[in-house]
Image (tube, rainbow, N blue to C red):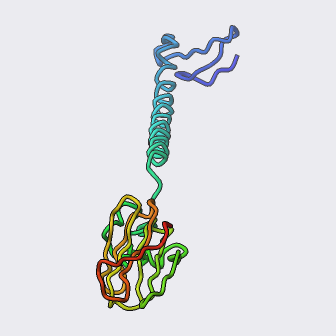
Amino acid sequence: MLRAGRGRYWCTPGGRASSYDAAGAEPDIQTTLKEPIISSLSTLSARRKVIAVAIAILSLSAVTAAARPARVPIGGGPPCYGPTCVGRDPNITDPLGFSCVNGGSGATDLVTVTWGNTYTLRWSDFCHANWVRAVDNNTDYYVETYDGHKEWGRGYYTFMVNGNELARLCYTAIDGNPSHYYCTGWY
């Protein structure tokens, strides 16, 4: 039997923990041991609560971050595309300065015709649009889509048409007769 002194815990031969108060009476073991155990559990419980709240916040942050769409860089795409390019200048630019003329792999010349003037039907893969470029602007010309939409020459080029449609370029003959229009095939 181990005895530490009055008011202190000791172990009886049966293995039961006990203590005596100053008057020599044995207090209830549960009352004696309850206080230190509960206070240590409350500290442990508070720590667990703090850890649980931190884990919950981090988990919600991860879920929220995963639910956000990916960032799209500003100016990463064309200034217009297909039908949204109709009637617009081919030199219109996105915020990074790319236009239907110089964006992507640049514009492609589909067909060039020389008949008193040189006309080129151009295609932009970047914008999916067509337009006509002229060397000089002394004759009438236009770009036409297969559905009949036309954009007339304004100086050295036409505004764009929907590049998802077949397109062709048309121009007046050098004889000056405005009713004599010649057109290329469909591209």
The image quadrant that residue 145 belongs to is: bottom left
x then y, percent, for residue 172:
35, 81
62 vs 41: above or below: below
x then y, percent, for residue 116:
42, 91
Residue at 48 percent across and 66 percent down: it is 186
Work out which residue is located at the far top of the displayed protein and give it. 14
Q: Is residue 142 visible?
A: yes
The residue nearer to you, when weighing 122 against 182, is 182
The residue nearer to you, when weighing 53 against 90, is 90
| Number of numbered markers | 0
Residue at 45 percent across and 41 percent down: it is 60
Quadrant containing the N terminus is: top right
x then y, percent, for residue 49:
46, 34
x then y, percent, for residue 149:
33, 63
171 vs 62: above or below: below
Residue at 32 percent across and 91 percent down: it is 138
63 vs 133: above or below: above
Q: Is residue 92 visible?
A: no
150 vs 11: above or below: below
Instruction: Classify residue 131 as left or right of residue 19.
Output: left
The image quadrant that residue 181 belongs to is: bottom left
The residue nearer to you, when weighing 75 against 170, is 170
Residue at 43 percent across and 73 percent down: it is 183
The residue nearer to you, when weighing 41 against 50, is 50
